[in-house]
Amino acid sequence: MSAAFRIETDRLVMREFSLEDVDAMWELNSDPDVIQYTGDRSFTNRQEVIDLITGYDQYSKYKMGRWSMSLKATGEYIGWCGIKYLADLDETDLGFRLMKKFWDKGYATESSVAALSYGFDQLALKSILGRAAKDNIRSIRVLKKLGMVYEKDFFEHDRVCEQHRLTNEMWNKQKEILPGRNVNP
Ligand SMILES: CC(C)(COP(=O)(O)OP(=O)(O)OC[C@H]1O[C@@H](n2cnc3c(N)ncnc32)[C@H](O)[C@@H]1OP(=O)(O)O)[C@@H](O)C(=O)NCCC(=O)NCCS
């Protein structure tokens, strides 16, 4: 993967994190409602954001990662979505985080379909997890809309969380009927 890496969906462009995103990522993590269920805290200074971006090694190590997203129509940054390798679990995890003003417009689902397509169709991954706090209604709803199947509860960041899984086999059976399927990786 490289700076030229780009996925397009109907409404979104997804690309690697870059230093152009510093202000937007700062703003994203500054909203308590956005980070409520994530276990993350707000950044305390801009250098932390710069260090996160410059030290982000998922792209080079695993050919995947979270990707910055912007609206095709306006170029506006809306948040990030993508698949990430979790070394401690030896699993790949789907994740998404959007600015609040862009919630409930189907963007997480649309970008997730593109991320799953990349993981299953390009990288030939065997399965991808979706993990979210049980109280995070929107996030759990997105996992269900993607056809992910509940696997187990677990405890993280002082919260009961759910683990959902989608296998490559399940993906191939249902990918044509998922919302926002029209992607161009
Ligand atoms: C989770 C998140 C990414 C979802 O993004 P989104 O773009 O709003 O997701 P979508 O629009 O694709 O889907 C949201 C779904 O939740 C539903 N929803 C919203 N509020 C709801 C409620 N109170 N009860 C039930 N469903 C609700 C929406 O109706 C929609 O489902 P539908 O398409 O069936 O109508 C976004 O809310 C976010 O960034 N949250 C903060 C960060 C976060 O928690 N990330 C996940 C960590 S695991």
Image (cartoon, rainbow, N blue to C red):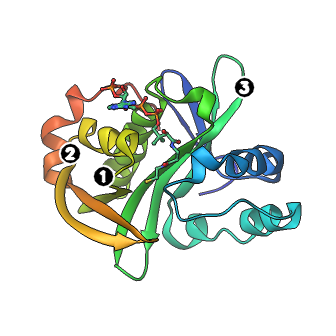
Crowding at dot 2, Cα within 10 Å, few <14 / some 14-19 / many 20+, comes out as many
Mark 2 and mark 3 lie on one chain; the one further toward the N terminus is 3
Q: Amino acid at mark 3?
A: Gly
Label number found at residue 112: none
Label number found at residue 171: 2
Are the residues flagged by discs 2 and 1 in contact, CB closer than 8 Å? yes
Crowding at dot 1, Cα within 10 Å, few <14 / some 14-19 / many 20+, comes out as many
Q: Mark 1: which secondary structure?
A: helix
Residue 30 rendering spot, x and y as whole percentages:
73, 50
Are the residues flagged by discs 2 and 3 in contact, CB closer than 8 Å? no
Q: Mark 2: which secondary structure?
A: helix
Position of 10 relative to 90 (above/below): above
Q: Nearer the viewer, residue 71 or 161?
A: 161
Q: Mark 3: which secondary structure?
A: loop
Label number found at residue 120: 1
Position of 73 relative to 120 (above/below): above
Crowding at dot 3, Cα within 10 Å, few <14 / some 14-19 / many 20+, comes out as few
Residue 145 rendering spot, x and y as whole percentages:
26, 35
Residue at image coords 23%, 63%: 126
Residue picked out by circle 3? 75
User: Does label 1 point to a residue whose CB lies under 8 Å from ligand 1?
Assistant: no
Position of 83 relative to 81 (above/below): below
Determine whether, in the image, residue 81 is placed left or right of residue 29: left
> How far apart are labels 3 and 1 at the CA level?
27 Å
Determine whether, in the image, residue 62 is placed left or right of residue 91: right
Q: Nearer the viewer, residue 128 or 24?
A: 24
> How far apart are labels 2 and 3 at the CA level?
30 Å
Residue at image coords 78%, 61%: 49
Residue at image coords 17%, 43%: 172
Residue 152 placement: quadrant: bottom left
Q: Amino acid at mark 2?
A: Trp
